[in-house]
């Protein structure tokens, strides 16, 4: 299985590099999973390429989530898990977001399914998504203060 | 209740609050419906009434302790949740699970799938006004829960699947019990079908209701029976096999109609496929053999060894006081839950507690397509649509 994943990852990296030399900042291989690190400003364009390029065809956005690496900066790591149903392949796109300017392009124009996933990240991590059609809290009440999944938010007790 | 000026000329629309206590929302889902008479103009789901911060709590537990939290997300599929979490941690650690434990896992999650579909069928039929189906479905579900109780000591919050294998050896005479169940079950599924499939009221309530084309469903990230009822044979057990599913022979049922009735037919067909898988698992699981992998310092040592070997005792003490520390990195695993693609993302920073645990819950993401499904239809169809999306609010809100 790892062999296949790597072979497919090579195609993906090659396709993305030939489209834009700056799109792939880094390729991380861990436990047979491939992560492509994308520069902050190129996220939406790269995502679009992953979906529209016929050789890649990542038509399903499976998941989007965030990891808080507090106190390291840039502290937020956004992970998008893509699936290509016709090709039977998976890929992770990653981009870093700093806490000074926690803003990133929304992927709703590419995959409408990103809508609630991004609202969840906004709700729990406080990252703003530019171009999101309806960026409101989704799990917590509107008047809630703070972003509970940040590492500096305590599990119990008062903040 | 308030009335608002509608965009469409002189007709007045009304905003109706459906839930969070409405019985057909299967928990605490609230949907704001803008109505023009009986027609739904706009639907806005409102979530979070059951948010318990499970992902945050996982960060404060050791890897082993967090298993018990996963049971409580999708309470109709606790074994599936255990499985996806354990697979993710095992991937992070690079652990191999013994074949026997893998087959036991497969058998348990397939029984769980049957039980989850039975609860779905029973409650959905209840929503549609067919009272008796629920009684039939819960009769068979009870048999499955009895099997779980004998295997794990628990009917629902089993925590039976553990990192590196399963918790306990199968109980005495388990094979006969499971065999009795799979022998009985096909005739029982025929019974449900006799009650519903050709039933005129059932067809009238479901056929042509909640249609969405496959490309819209994929764009909205819908997975599971909802997507397969639209003709897309996407099933993680086939496309990205895990836990030795590639050794099992089963079909992925699909339909082309993509309406509520097609979703019903797909789920019933899935029950039959799951029975087939359980039967095969019965043949594959040997009477003797390991149920856990050997990994000193990660998997608790056997009781016998602890009494004779100093090292085993030290490992035991360290695992239950400090826990174990996977190398830094992350892993994402997706399995096919009864509701769709259930994913688990675990990130480690090299400490005994996870840096981040995230669940890609199919209920949450499938619910996203609800407004598109119901807008332009009747209120009664909204109930049918919520039912056939098959949400579990514990998993939606986590």
Image (cartoon, coloured by chain):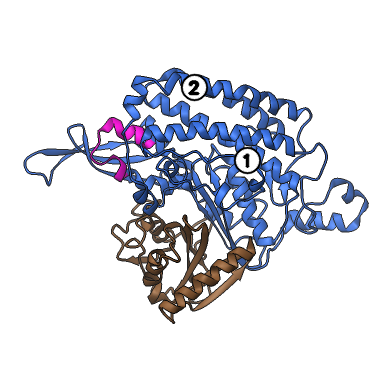
Toward which corner of the image does residue B89 lie, by quadrant?
A: bottom right
Residue at the extreme right: B308
Residue B44 is tagged as none
With B37 as the anchor, is A120 left or right in this view? right
Give the residue pinned by disc 2: B192
Above or below for B314 versus A24: above
Q: Quadrant of the N terminus of chain A?
A: bottom right
| Residue drawn at x 63%, y 51% as measured from the top left | B242
Chain B: give its colour.
blue
Residue to which mark 1 is pinned: B249
Q: Which chain is brown?
A: A
Part of the protein shown in magenta: B371-386
Residue lying at the far bottom in this picture: please name it: A21
Q: Is residue B378 magenta?
A: yes
Residue placed at 48% from the left, 46% from the top? B233
Q: Secondary structure at mark 2?
A: helix
Is residue B159 something that shows in the picture?
Answer: no
Q: Considering only vertical position in the picture, is B348 above or below B20?
A: below
Side (left or right) of B142 relative to A43: right
Q: Position of residue B91 (x, y in %)?
A: 65, 59
User: Residue placed at 58% from the left, 40% from the top?
Assistant: B78
Asked whether B41 or A19 is in front, the reply is: A19
Is B121 colored magenta in this rendering?
no
Q: Is residue B11 above or below residue B216?
A: above
Most prominent secondary structure in the magenta stretch? Answer: helix
């Amino acid at each position: 299985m790892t062999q296949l994943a790597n072979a497919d990852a090579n195609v993906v990296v090659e396709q993305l590099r030939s489209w834009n030399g700056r799109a792939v900042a880094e390729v991380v291989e861990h436990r047979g999973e491939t992560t492509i690190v994308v520069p902050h400003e190129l996220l939406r364009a790269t995502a679009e390429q992953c979906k529209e390029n016929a050789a890649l065809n990542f038509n399903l956005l499976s998941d989007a989530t965030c990891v808080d690496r507090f106190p390291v900066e840039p502290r937020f790591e956004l992970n998008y898990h893509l699936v290509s149903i016709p090709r039977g392949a998976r890929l992770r796109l990653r981009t870093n977001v700093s806490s000074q300017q926690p803003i990133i392009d929304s992927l709703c124009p590419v995959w409408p399914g990103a809508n609630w996933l991004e609202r969840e990240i906004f709700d729990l991590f406080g990252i703003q998504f530019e171009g999101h059609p309806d960026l409101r809290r989704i799990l917590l009440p509107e008047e809630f203060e703070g972003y509970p999944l940040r590492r500096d938010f305590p599990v119990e007790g008062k903040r | 209740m308030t009335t608002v000026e509608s965009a469409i000329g002189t007709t007045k629309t009304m905003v109706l609050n459906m839930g969070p206590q409405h019985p057909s929302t299967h928990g605490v889902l609230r949907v704001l419906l803008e109505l023009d008479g009986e027609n739904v103009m706009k639907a806005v789901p409102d979530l979070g009434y059951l948010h318990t911060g499970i992902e945050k709590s996982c960060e404060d537990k050791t890897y082993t302790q967090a298993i018990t939290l996963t049971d409580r997300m999708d309470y109709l599929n606790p074994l599936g949740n255990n499985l996806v979490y354990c697979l993710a941690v095992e991937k992070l650690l690079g652990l191999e699970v013994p074949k026997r434990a893998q087959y036991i896992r497969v058998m348990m999650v397939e029984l769980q799938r049957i039980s989850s579909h039975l609860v779905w069928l029973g409650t959905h039929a209840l929503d549609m006004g067919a009272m008796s189906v629920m009684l039939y479905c819960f009769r068979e579900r009870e048999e499955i829960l009895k099997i779980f109780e004998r295997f794990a000591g628990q009917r629902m919050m089993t925590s039976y699947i553990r990192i590196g294998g399963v918790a306990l050896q199968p109980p005495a005479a388990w094979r006969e019990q499971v065999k009795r169940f799979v022998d009985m079950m096909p005739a029982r599924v025929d019974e449900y079908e006799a009650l519903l499939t050709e039933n005129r009221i059932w067809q009238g309530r479901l056929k042509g209701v909640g249609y969405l084309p496959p490309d819209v469903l994929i764009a909205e990230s819908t997975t599971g029976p909802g997507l397969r009822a639209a003709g897309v044979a996407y099933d993680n057990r086939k496309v990205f096999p895990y836990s030795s599913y590639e050794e099992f022979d089963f079909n992925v049922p699909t339909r082309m109609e993509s309406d509520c009735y097609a979703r019903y037919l797909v789920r019933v067909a899935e029950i039959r496929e799951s029975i087939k898988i359980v039967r095969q698992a019965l043949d594959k699981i040997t009477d003797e053999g390991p149920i856990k992998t050997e990994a000193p310092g990660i998997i608790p040592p056997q009781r016998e060894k602890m009494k004779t070997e100093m090292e085993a005792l030290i490992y035991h003490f360290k695992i239950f006081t400090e826990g174990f520390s996977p190398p830094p990195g992350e892993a994402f695993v997706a399995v096919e839950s009864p509701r769709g693609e259930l994913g688990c993302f675990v990130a480690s920073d090299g400490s005994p507690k996870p840096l981040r645990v995230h669940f890609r819950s199919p209920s949450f993401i499938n619910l996203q397509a609800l407004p598109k499904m119901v807008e332009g239809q009747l209120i009664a169809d909204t109930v049918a649509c919520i039912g056939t999306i098959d949400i579990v609010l514990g998993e939606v809100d986590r």
